[in-house]
Image (cartoon, rainbow, N blue to C red):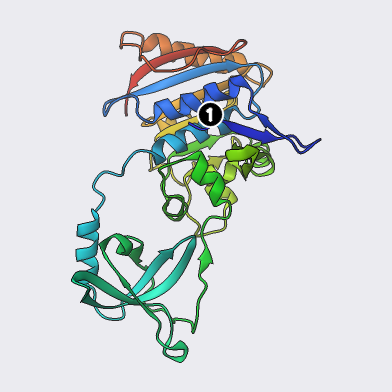
């Protein structure tokens, strides 16, 4: 996993994240592949302060999930064959470079002895621009959810990832365009929404490139928290406030990991995410710390007959206490 830096607001220099931050990133990352179909893991941590712990753990979880191949995904061959069966004029989405374009399906043909599909990206007024795509290239084409589209004369397309170099170097091997276009609820954070918003949007992060250069981005570029995105944008994470009487809208969906940012979040919403791994962050300076610690300890005692999980984690940082145990999924 590449080392992360943050930009010092006072001098603009890129500074390595402190050692303790890597522990939370690793914790989130490791939990994405831990547990089993019937067992989930609870990581309860007493921390000196809550700042950034939830964001870092969520970042590790999103990176971990992004690196896992999607089961049941169509191969290039299967995807190409499905496209070949489309009717003329079927609306399509076409990813070219870091741009998303509108297109329609034209036909199936052969070029230089190789099977190809033909798609149209320009209107008749613009010359009916078409492209021939082989099986590998056609993987960038998908059927649009629109019933009908109007092609422009000449389209540049919409930029997909605004800080592509940051994501590409942070998650090598992950297609950042597909990552930014597909929704999946990997992580839910329950906690102080306004504080989390400032952490994920205002904090500038960086990944080191060659020759001392850096690619900059934010937690939000990676986490893609739905609450902080425009409607319709693809998300990977969501955040819910501690206050309020309504249950989260996604209560029926179990994310891979639920992060409770503070004792109040844990005490109020823990039953909502009983099918997910838990990361419980109890701020020693926060309200209801002892109440949260007592409930967590009782849950640990109730489940201590189960085998304690063995996770490949770095040493717990000084000043932080952690309990780790398995519970049955519900």
Farthest residue in the right direction?
Answer: 10
The residue located at (76%, 39%) in the rendering is 12
Instruction: Say whether residue 299 is left or right of residue 51.
Output: left
Nearer to us in this view, 298 or 40: 40
The residue located at (36%, 9%) in the rendering is 304
Answer few, some or many: residues within 10 Å of disc 1's Cα (few below 14, many 20 plus, some between 14 and 19). many
**The C terminus is located in which quarter?**
top left
Nearer to us in this view, 45 or 298: 45
**Vertical placement of residue 99 versus 47, above or below:** below
Please provide percent x and percent y for residue 177: 45, 54
Identify the secondary structure beneath mark 1. strand
Please provide percent x and percent y for residue 71: 26, 43
Count every numbered label the image shows and give the total: 1
Which of the 4 image quarters holds residue 324?
top left
Q: Is residue 134 visible?
A: yes
Q: Is residue 272 visible?
A: no
Farthest residue in the bottom direction?
Answer: 125
Q: Which residue is mark 1?
A: 260
**Vertical placement of residue 278 versus 195, above or below:** above
Please provide percent x and percent y for residue 30: 41, 26
Which of the 4 image quarters holds residue 307?
top left
Please provide percent x and percent y for residue 250: 44, 45
Instruction: Say whether residue 21 is left or right of residue 174.
Output: right
Nearer to us in this view, 175 or 268: 175
The residue located at (40%, 18%) in the rendering is 312
**Vertical placement of residue 282 versus 231, above or below:** above
**Vertical placement of residue 19 versus 192, above or below:** above
């Amino acid at each position: 996993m590449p080392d992360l830096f943050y930009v010092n607001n006072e001098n603009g220099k890129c500074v390595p994240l402190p050692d303790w931050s890597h522990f939370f990133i690793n914790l989130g990352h490791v939990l994405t592949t831990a547990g089993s179909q019937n067992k989930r893991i609870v990581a309860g941590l007493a921390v000196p302060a809550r700042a950034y712990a939830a964001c870092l753990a969520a970042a590790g979880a999103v990176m971990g999930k992004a690196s896992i191949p999607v089961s049941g995904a169509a191969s290039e061959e299967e995807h190409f064959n499905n496209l070949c069966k489309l009717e003329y004029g079927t609306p399509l989405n076409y990813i070219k470079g870091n741009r998303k374009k509108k297109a329609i399906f034209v036909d199936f043909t052969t070029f230089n002895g190789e099977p190809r599909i033909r798609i149209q990206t320009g209107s008749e007024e613009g010359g009916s621009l078409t492209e021939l795509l082989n099986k590998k290239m056609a993987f960038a084409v998908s059927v649009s959810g629109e019933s009908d589209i109007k092609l422009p004369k000449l389209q540049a397309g919409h930029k997909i990832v605004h800080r592509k170099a940051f994501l590409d170097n942070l998650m090598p091997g992950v297609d950042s365009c597909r990552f930014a276009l597909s929704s999946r609820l990997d992580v839910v954070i329950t906690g102080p929404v306004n504080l989390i918003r400032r952490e994920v949007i205002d904090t500038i992060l960086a990944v080191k490139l060659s020759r001392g250069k850096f690619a900059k981005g934010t937690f939000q570029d990676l986490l893609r928290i739905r609450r902080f995105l425009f409607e319709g944008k693809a998300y990977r994470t969501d955040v819910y406030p501690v206050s309020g009487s309504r249950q989260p809208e996604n209560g029926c969906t179990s994310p891979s990991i639920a992060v409770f940012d503070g004792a109040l979040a844990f005490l109020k919403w823990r039953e909502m995410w009983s099918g997910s791994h838990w990361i419980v962050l109890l701020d020693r300076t926060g309200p209801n710390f002892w109440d949260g610690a007592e409930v967590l300890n009782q849950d640990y005692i109730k489940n201590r007959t189960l085998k304690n999980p063995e996770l490949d984690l770095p040493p717990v940082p000084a000043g932080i206490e952690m309990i780790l145990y398995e519970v049955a999924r519900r």
